[in-house]
Image: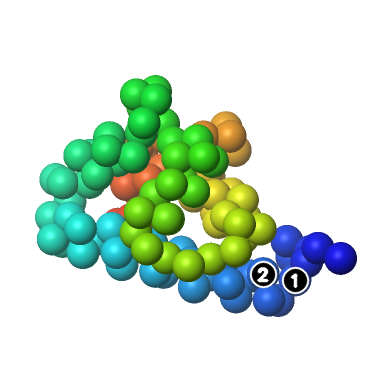
Amino acid sequence: MPEDEDSAATKATVKHLVTEVRARILQLARNDPSLLRKIFNDFDLKGSDCLTIDEVTNLIAKLKIAVERKYIYPFFKVIDTNNSGTIEYEEFEAYILDK
């Protein structure tokens, strides 16, 4: 039986994933916000100026964060604040800089 996206365990795992991804990307950027665009573009494999769920899955893997695949979509939804089904740079930047 799959866990409900609203379960306490899912929420706790997604919260941890949000914190971990933010910390590792800031580490990659050497805490320099001007490098965020380059990092975003590096993970935007299709060059579409937005990140798909597959590109976010790849980002998490490249950051060497071990997480079950079932938590990636709930994590994705946290960052996709406009519910477009992709993560635009503005959403990515706001997420990383905790705006």
The residue sitting at 49% across, 48% down in the picture is 57
Q: Give residue 69's position: percent from left, percent from top.
A: 61, 57
Dot 2: element: helix
Residue 54 vs residue 50: left or right?
right
Point out residue 93 in the picture as x, y percentages from the top left corner. Answer: 32, 47
Residues 35 and 43: in front is: 43
Amino acid type, mark 1 = Ser
Q: Residues within 10 Å of mark 1 (few under 14, many from 20)?
A: few
Between the C-alphas of marks 2 and 1, the distance is 5 Å
Question: Which type of secondary structure does the marked residue at label 1 adopt?
Answer: loop
> On screen, 30 above or below 16?
above
Along the line of sight, which residue is nearer the eye, 87 or 82? 87
Nearest the viewer among 64 and 6 is 64
Q: Residue at position x 16%, y 46% from top? A: 35
Q: Residues within 10 Å of mark 2 (few under 14, many from 20)?
A: some
Give the vertical position of 81 relative to 52 (above or below). Answer: below
Q: Of the numbered discs in the image, which one, if any, rests on residue 79?
A: none
Q: Label 2 belongs to which residue?
A: 10
Seen at 20% across and 58% down, the residue is: 28
Q: Is disc 2 in contact with disc 1, using a CB cutoff of under 8 Å?
A: yes
- Is residue 11 left or right of 62 when viewed as pictured? right
> Taking 2 as reference, is 55 left or right?
left
Q: Pinpoint residue 19: horizontal percent, then vertical percent.
A: 41, 69
- Residue in the foreground of this view, choosing between 68 and 74: 68
Quadrant occupied by the N terminus: bottom right
User: Which quadrant would the C terminus be assigned to in this image?
Assistant: bottom left
Q: Amino acid at mark 2?
A: Thr
Indicate left or right for 94 with 38 as reference.
right
Q: Is residue 87 visible?
A: no
Disc number placed over residue 7 in the picture, else none:
1
> Is residue 15 at all visible to an observer of this figure?
yes
